[in-house]
């Protein structure tokens, strides 16, 4: 049953609240498994553990279930459309979504439908959920002999367990437990990855549109506040950098709010000018149009078969990705994260306001942008705005095995598979920079399609033995920036959440560390697609 949550969607379950035992501050409750997370993986891990007969609790730092799959990411990237590659709970989620629309399969759905399905699946499983419970990152993780004993939230609730799962998008539990991790981009040399590190976007053909340049500049845009005058300073978001491809750094790809918008006048809430609007913040967008790039700056996909309701994602040279504004987010304090999120909201509203009202924007672009607004039937308790910022990457664990470009490209294979990836190795813009010719270009965009499904290693979701022996990390897993760009799809996260829950149960039954789980026993719980052909292992030389 559910208890200790505040989201309005659950108001119909008040009768369950009245019959449940509510934890109070400083109350210790003991479980087999504690799942700490705000993602779709967290929900599926909890359901899987519950259905496996474990005493499990989901401690969620947000006010809703499902992560990005319930917060605007309606256009699901599969990389493979076959549901048999998703795993049983992920497959069940998408089957239920499709059933809502009277279909056998659908990849794009409205946020409230995703929320509804997550809520139904969790309710049917009878899982225990605590919402709005953020871990005390300074003093809230108690360790003993390399094991997590308990976690305590900022409200004072303490949860003890035999096994823990960090299914957050940022890896807060992992970090608080002292597990090694990295943030940013590895160099080409570190793991022998040809698309690692800095990737300058000024070597692409200067044509109107191709797959290779769709997220790059195709026109020359002046970077200075006063055009042609370096002394006037750079436009917001632009950096004066001498970039060399392949060099590693601590920077991450851009975040945005994955917007759900409608053009139906009866359902539309206008995207108004933000209080802190500055036209200069969007000068780069305007100048790109003036330079001749008239591509509409968005990837728009209808939701649930409705042409008047869409998933709006960033695309082309200047979209609603807020490049460079999120670099400190993964390790920032809760307060600073909320500030960064507000900065992104202001930027996004400013982007839409500029696109639809600035007289320097081409008329056709303005007219189309004016059609769209926030839907009245989404995120009703949050001003119709998505609950969660789109955290494309944050911390990444340095665990027993690091997934890399070699794994995604079928140049290396693993024999301890817990899930399957298929989407392209993908990164959005990391930063805008001034090139040697004095024009703005993008750094960080990569795209490389795997030859087919590839396996994700069990060892990539567990820490090094000497650091922690009872923790799983299925979202901020051990992967390079390049590989994580492919793995980070919501259906994959769901499947990994399910898999680690089953592994945690085996660790409990065998009274062993996560590093010693018998994979032959785990293998039978891992949903395997029918069309998967194992990749032969080889020994690539890599720098640790």
Image: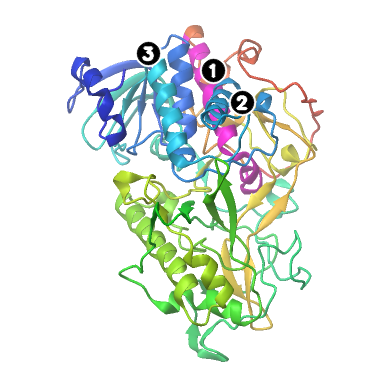
Left or right, 306 with respect to 79, comes to left
* Chief SS of the magenta region: helix
Kind of element beneath mark 2: helix
| Sooner in the amino-acid sequence: mark 1 or mark 3 | 3
In reply to whether residue 417 is colored magenta, the answer given is no
Q: State the residue at coordinates (46%, 12%).
A: 51
On screen, 386 above or below 118?
Answer: below
Label 2 close to label 3 by CB (< 8 Å): no
Separation of disc 1 and disc 2 at Cα?
A: 9 Å
Which image quarter holds the C terminus? top right
Q: Which residue is mark 1?
A: 503
Q: Which residue is mark 3?
A: 55
Q: Which residue is mark 2?
A: 458
Left or right, 374 with respect to 220, comes to left
Q: Which residues are magenta?
A: 480-508
Place of residue 75 in the rendered image (x, y in percent of width and height, measured from the top left) = 57, 44
Place of residue 8 in the rendered image (x, y in percent of width and height, measured from the top left) = 27, 36
Label 1 close to label 2 by CB (< 8 Å): yes
Label 1 close to label 3 by CB (< 8 Å): no
Q: Which of the two discs, 2 and 3, sits closer to the camera?
A: 3
On screen, 75 above or below 504?
Answer: below
Which image quarter holds the N terminus? top left
């Amino acid at each position: 049953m559910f208890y200790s949550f505040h989201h309005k969607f659950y108001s119909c379950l008040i009768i369950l609240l009245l019959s449940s035992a509510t934890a109070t501050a400083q109350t210790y409750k003991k479980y087999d498994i504690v799942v700490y997370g705000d993602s779709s993986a967290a929900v599926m891990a909890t359901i899987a553990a519950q259905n496996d007969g474990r005493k499990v609790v989901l401690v969620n730092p947000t006010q809703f279930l499902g992560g990005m799959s319930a917060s605007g990411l309606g256009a699901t990237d599969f990389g493979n459309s076959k549901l048999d590659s998703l795993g049983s709970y992920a497959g069940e989620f998408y089957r239920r979504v499709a059933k809502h629309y009277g279909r056998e399969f659908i990849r794009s759905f409205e946020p409230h439908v995703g929320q509804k399905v997550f809520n139904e699946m969790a309710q049917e499983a009878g899982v225990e959920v605590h919402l709005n419970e953020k871990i005390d990152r300074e003093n809230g993780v108690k360790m003993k002999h390399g094991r997590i004993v308990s976690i305590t939230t900022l409200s004072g609730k303490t949860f003890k367990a035999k096994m823990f799962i960090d299914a957050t998008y940022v890896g807060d539990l992992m970090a608080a437990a002292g597990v090694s991790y990295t943030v940013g981009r590895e160099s080409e040399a570190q793991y022998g990855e040809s698309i690692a590190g800095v990737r300058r976007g000024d070597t692409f053909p200067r044509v109107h549109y191709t797959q290779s340049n769709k997220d790059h500049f195709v026109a020359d845009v002046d970077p200075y506040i006063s055009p042609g005058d370096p002394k006037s300073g750079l436009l917001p978001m632009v950096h004066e950098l001498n970039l060399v491809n392949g060099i590693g750094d601590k920077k991450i790809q851009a975040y945005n709010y994955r917007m759900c918008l409608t053009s139906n006048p009866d359902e539309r809430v206008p995207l108004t000018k933000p209080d802190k609007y500055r036209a200069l913040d969007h000068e780069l967008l305007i100048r790109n149009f003036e330079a001749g790039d008239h591509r509409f700056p968005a990837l728009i996909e209808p939701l649930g078969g409705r042409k008047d309701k869409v998933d709006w994602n960033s695309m082309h040279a200047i979209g609603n990705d807020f490049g460079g504004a999120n670099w400190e987010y993964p390790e920032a304090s809760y307060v600073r994260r909320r500030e960064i999120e507000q900065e992104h909201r202001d930027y996004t509203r400013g982007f839409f306001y500029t696109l639809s009202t600035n007289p320097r924007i081409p008329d056709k672009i303005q007219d189309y942008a004016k059609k769209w607004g926030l839907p009245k039937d989404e995120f009703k308790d949050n001003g119709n705005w998505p609950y969660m910022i789109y955290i494309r990457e944050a911390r990444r664990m340095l665990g027993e095995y690091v997934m890399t470009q070699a794994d995604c490209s079928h140049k290396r294979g693993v024999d301890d598979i817990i899930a399957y990836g298929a989407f392209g190795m993908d990164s959005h813009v990391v930063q805008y920079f001034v090139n040697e010719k004095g024009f703005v270009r993008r750094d960080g965009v990569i795209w490389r399609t795997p030859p087919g499904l590839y396996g994700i290693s069990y060892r990539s979701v567990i820490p090094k033995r000497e650091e922690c022996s009872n923790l799983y990390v299925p979202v901020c897993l051990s992967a390079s920036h390049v590989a994580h760009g492919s793995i980070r799809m919501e259906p994959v996260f769901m499947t990994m959440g399910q898999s680690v829950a089953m592994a945690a149960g085996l660790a409990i039954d065998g009274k062993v560390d996560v590093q010693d789980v018998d994979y032959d026993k785990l293998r039978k719980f891992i949903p395997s697609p029918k069309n998967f052909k194992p990749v032969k292992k080889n020994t690539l030389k890599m720098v640790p």
